[in-house]
Amino acid sequence: MQQLNFEPVLTSDKETALREHVRSFLAEHGDFPAANVIDSWSVCDPAFSKLLAEQGWIGMTWPTEYGGGGRSYLERYVVIEELLAAGAPVGAHWVADRQSGPLLLRFGTEAQRQYFLPKVTQGECFFAIGMSEPNSGSDLASIKTRAERVDGGWIVNGSKIWTSWAHVCHYMITLCRTAEPSDNRHAGLSQLIVDLHAEGITIRPIITLAGEAHFNEIFFDNVFVPDEHVAGKVDEGWSQVMAELAFERSGPERFLSSYKLLEESISVLGKMALKQESMATIGKFVARLMVLRQMSLSVASQLQDGKLPVNEASVVKDLGTSFEQELPEAMRLILSTEPRANAKEGIERLLSDTILKAPSFSLRGGTREILRGIIARGLGLR
Ligand SMILES: Cc1cc2nc3c(=O)[nH]c(=O)nc-3n(C[C@H](O)[C@H](O)[C@H](O)COP(=O)(O)OP(=O)(O)OC[C@H]3O[C@@H](n4cnc5c(N)ncnc54)[C@H](O)[C@@H]3O)c2cc1C
């Protein structure tokens, strides 16, 4: 049986100094409204992304020749951890920074890197993820969106769904079928960089349980994509998507979506005489958080070494999203308050937002059942 690798990682004085720097930046710019602090990496604020770009906090690990910071994954980890813990609205550049940029660095052409990456690091170019379709979510290999070869490029027809921030983003890395399905279901898929303002694209919002419109349906009606916008190799998109998911699944966003609720609950409960049982509940959540943090740091360090820890990333996401989903109900039981969706601020609002948003935490980026299948296969148990 294969082993999981969660080698412990210690951060150094360099990262501690950077953490202090991020905290002083947040002391100046971090007065975020309560309505935006739960799941803040799904909150899109291009002006705030621009501020982060000015600090050099987008594309931090990318080579300087493409506008990146040439810094380590651990430094990036420290920055995003502080931003998420503060509830900063980092959604606009999130996907480009986390996975589209790394994908282009790994599989893109030199021209694509030179064209797209500096724009991303300047906070001027945002990417969406175009994978899921109405009848293909978990079973991604069954997608129907087709790209057909024409002179100088491809014509795309089909649709995508649940596409976060497509109405704000500039481009979408779109998984398409470029060859007829065969015995090998994973063959014949390609990733295209689609300009979301191109002719033939229609984007329609879908309203979430929390009343927000951050994800969409997208329809492609004969959309032309030039050859220069093929990301990686034609018909070999599947292995690229799998590599992308290691970046997508392991970060601190997979357990910090509800963090502000934990922080505020501790602050409220700290002023009350607590039962032993309630203290034990808080203690358990804090302990789980610290373990998840170490596991996620370990994955960041493996990415730094050029590895693709797909199994470990899946474990972080499975345990992390369970943590952030269980938190609201546990806090509701020990706080003597009820959730209130129309409260402007305070614990009632945080509780309500977390309850309404939490169901999606374990769906986006691969469901719990799918992750457990990946882990079992990766460990040689299936
Ligand atoms: C907030 C949010 C944002 C999202 N953003 C994006 C985005 O930007 N881009 C994008 O492409 N997608 C996005 N998604 C879509 C997300 O990736 C899919 O919802 C997810 O992969 C599940 O697919 P599905 O919704 O089609 O569910 P299904 O695949 O239909 O699954 C339904 C249920 O069946 C279970 N199931 C399915 N297959 C199996 C199996 N083989 N074994 C056991 N159980 C199984 C699943 O675990 C799930 O519980 C987003 C989703 C959410 C909730």
Image (cartoon, rainbow, N blue to C red):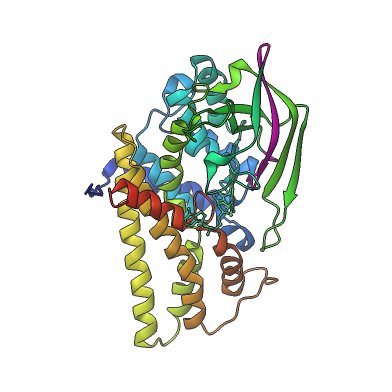
Count the marks. Answer: 0
**Residue that appears at 37% across and 43% down:** 18
**Front-most of 295 and 341?**
295
Dividing the picture into quarters, in which one does residue 306 lie? top left
**Front-most of 65 and 215?**
215
**Front-most of 301 and 375?**
375
Q: Residue furthest top?
A: 151
**Can I make out residue 88 in this image?**
no
**Residue that appears at 49% across and 15% down:** 110
> Which x, y percent locates residue 118?
54, 24
**Can I make out residue 293 in this image?**
yes
**Residue that appears at 61% across and 58% down:** 36
**Residue that appears at 65% across and 44% down:** 165
* Residues drawn in magenta: 150-168
Q: Is residue 251 magenta?
A: no
> Which x, y percent locates residue 268?
49, 77
Q: Does the magenta stretch include residue 151?
A: yes
> Which x, y percent locates residue 25?
49, 46
In the displayed structure, 210 sits above or below 19; it is below
In the displayed structure, 78 sits above or below 111; it is below
> Which x, y percent locates residue 40?
56, 54
In the displayed structure, 35 sits above or below 7; it is below
**Front-most of 98 and 26?**
98
